[in-house]
Image (cartoon, rainbow, N blue to C red):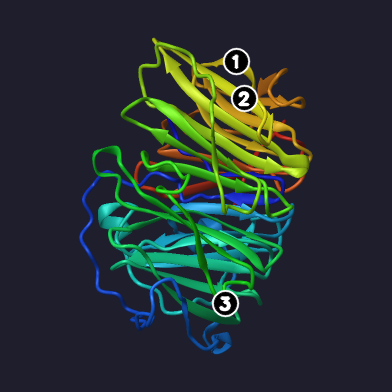
Amino acid sequence: MRPSTLFGFGMAAVVVTLSGCGADTPSHAHTSAAPRAASAGQASVSADVRLASRATAEVATLASSLRVADAHMRMLTAHTGMLWGYRGNHFAMYETIDGGHTWKPVPLPALPTDDMSAYGPGGAHEVTAVIDSSAMWSLVSVSHDQAHIWTTKDAGRHWRETTLPLPAGTVQFAAGQWMAGRLGFMLFESDGYNGVAAKYLYRTENGGGSWQLVATSTGGLPHNGVRTAMAFAPNGKTGLLAVVDDLEKTVLVVETNDGGLHWQPTSISLPSGIVAPPSIELALAGPGEALQLAIEVQVGSASELLVMNSSYGSSWDVAEIGVTHLEAMCASPAGDLAALEDKSGQQTWMVSPDGGQTWYTQPAQGLPASLADAASVSVSAPSPSAFFLVALDARLAASLYASSDGGDTWQPLG
């Protein structure tokens, strides 16, 4: 199963792809040493750092010089968006204002290195992006029981670094979300040894000036599994967290209606006879306490996509469809579901306007059959008619495609 970058209701559900690389990754020296906070749980915030003088006017086409391993993309509109990943051992970030045809480097603060080119993603200093709008972004890195969070509110001209002490044994960032610039959530977890991964949810109400630990695995969050998806609704209160338990081959789901302070477990029905760990393809929280999950499971030699809809605290309705080789899935701002499936070398575009009850399929014209061999494929929709896709090959090099007609036809970018 391929990991997916999922977006819906105007939010990013992280993209990390939420599972890391299986290879052991050595520790790297932290190139931006920040002092540990004096007291646990209280963030240490540095002064703003002006970076305008370091910015470059270089504008590149994808084909000429944009080389980013482990690429992730967040298009905010049909024309503007962000792309980030690694060039060698350095985190890189780009922005576009012409629908992905040309990209301009974003000025960045001093960030730790992580040798993605040699070891793949998931190192001790891996940097992850959490995007809120065209101006506000955060970069997150974890090492030595600390989270380093760099936040800009003016599209990279100034960055503020926050050092957040974490509980002992916390080694990775799992998910994050910003909402309207001030309310934010960050989820961290331990390494998942023997399938156990303690989770810690932090919340800020002042744009990252200070963070509060609001929930842990001893107080409502799942304790097992490391492939985690999290989403909060626009009201900032209704939320959903789902995590795959690889050992039990199931998905653990908890819900909140008070902004993450308290979580209640919920029961979802998966088919019997699952032969491999499930994959969470979509996790959304929307207006009116609406919750949605899309999970792919393998039963025997067949794969099934389960689309589940609920309102907070109520039972989940389940729609089921058989799939051959699901590659990526997303939701449009209008709430329509879209998915890309490989059927015997034919790229097929699937759309559902009713929460997964009914699906319409057609060939995805312009997408190469070679996508079936990609290491990962992610697709997102900044508008009901605009879709963008990023595919990584076996060496984590990216190819980008765009559709301006709702997925009927696709064109390569760059």
Q: Secondary structure at mark 1?
A: strand
* Nearest to viewer (mark 3 / mark 2): 3
* Alpha-carbon span between mark 3 and mark 2: 37 Å
Q: At 60% across and 16% down in the image, what residue appears? A: 320
Q: Which residue is mark 3?
A: 209
- Decide which of tag 3 and tag 2 comes sooner along the chain: 3
Estimate the spatial distance between the alpha carbons at disc 1 and disc 2, rounded to whole Å: 9 Å
The quadrant holding residue 245 is top left
Residue named by callout 1: 321
CA gap, disc 3 to disc 1?
45 Å
Three-letter residue code for mark 2: Val
Horizontal side of 280 relative to 359 (left or right) equals left
230 left or right of 247? right
Q: Would you call the spot at circle 3 few (<14 residues within 10 Å), some (14-19), or many (20 or more)?
A: some
- Ranked by sequence position, the earlier of labels 1 and 2 is 2
Residue 414 position, x and y percent, is 58, 53
Determine the residue positioned at 59% across, 70% down.
59
Cβ atoms under marks 3 and 1 closer than 8 Å: no
Which residue sits at x=72%, y=25%?
352
Residue under pointer 2: 307
Q: Is residue 396 visible?
A: yes
> Do the residues bearing badges 3 and 2 touch, measured as CB atoms within 8 Å?
no
Three-letter amino acid code at the position of disc 3: Gly
Figure check: 127 above or below 301: below
The tag earlier along the polypeptide, 3 or 1, is 3
Percent of width and height locating residue 174: 44, 52
Position of residue 279 relative to residue 223, above or below, is above
Percent position (x, y) of residue 84?
Answer: 50, 60
Which one is in front in this view, the residue at disc 3 or the one at disc 1?
3
